[in-house]
Image: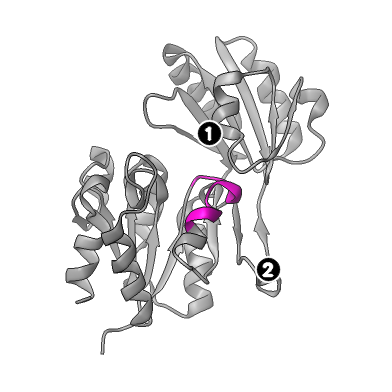
Amino acid sequence: MVEKHLIAVDLDGTLLTDDKKISKRNKIALQKAMEQGHEVVIATGRPYRASIMYYEEMNLTSPIVNFNGAFVHYPGNDEWGIYHEPLSIDTVKEIVEVSEKYNIHNILAEVMDDVYFHFHDEKLLDIFGFGNPKIETGDLRKVLKKDPTCILIHASEDEVPKIREYLSEVHAEVIDHRRWAAPWHVIELVRTGMNKAVGLQRVAAHYNIPQENIIAFGDEDNDYEMIEYAGTGVAMGNAIDGLKEKANEITLSNEEDGIAVFLEKKLQL
């Protein structure tokens, strides 16, 4: 009898191929794992509206970790609780103020599934229009009325390190920030202490699964905490070097069914 495991999967660059699909082999492996009694959970930086289609495609019946842990809930099970830990609106207004000193292209605020653009932006509208959020454009200091789940600053490449330095010096107590993978020069801000491991902890506690029985798959710097927290942290073949160094194991890339290859062996599927 294989002990019950919690399998946490990141989406982009991990479960999803480069054209944003779940491969047949990955899907079969995860279904088999669930049939054997293991739990599968999505842990992503994406908002819920941009991950629900994969949740449904895999027929998951588990909580889901969105916005890198700043929003965790259990679709269809309101009694489980909704964990939403947003940023303070005052901090955000200060950051907007200061950002005007840097060469920024845009600032976006996401309040759960509503998106606010500081400036109109056709290119980003395409990405963030995914899942039909309510979209509003205008000076964030005026249009934002609620604490946002996350903030995204889109800047020119050479400005990104300077902005991050400012954020670390002035706002380290209240926010955590990360950089998106190329080609995007985007800095993502969430409330301090929010990461995928925090979300995973809640889910593991719900299923009563010990830390050593958690298997987590990731590829980017927003997966560090989850990979370290999991009993078995697995970096994808296409993962950044820093994550490969932290991981217990490295599997094949997201284009080579890395998740399935690892689970078939590990769980004898």
Residue 91: image x %, image y %?
A: 70, 32
Residue range highlighted in magenta: 45-54
Of 263 and 126, the residue lying toward us: 126
Of 49 and 159, the residue lying toward us: 49
Instruction: Work out which quarter of the rendered image holds the N terminus and state it.
Output: bottom left
Determine which quarter of the picture holds residue 139.
top right
Residue 266 in sight: yes
At a point 31% along the width and 75% down the height, the residue shown is 32
**Vertical position of residue 143 compared to residue 76: above or below:** above
At a point 26% along the width and 42% down the height, the residue shown is 239
User: How is the structure coloured here?
Assistant: one colour
Residue 210 located left or right of residue 86: left
Residue 21: image x %, image y %?
A: 38, 48
Give SS at disc 2: loop
| Type of amino acid under label 2 | Gly
The overriding secondary structure of the stretch rendered in magenta is helix
User: How many neighbours does mark 2 have within 10 angstroms: few (below 14), some (14-19), or many (20 or more)?
Assistant: few
| Type of amino acid under label 1 | Glu
Which residue in the protein does label 2 denote? 81
Which residue in the protein does label 1 denote? 188
Magenta run includes residue 51: yes
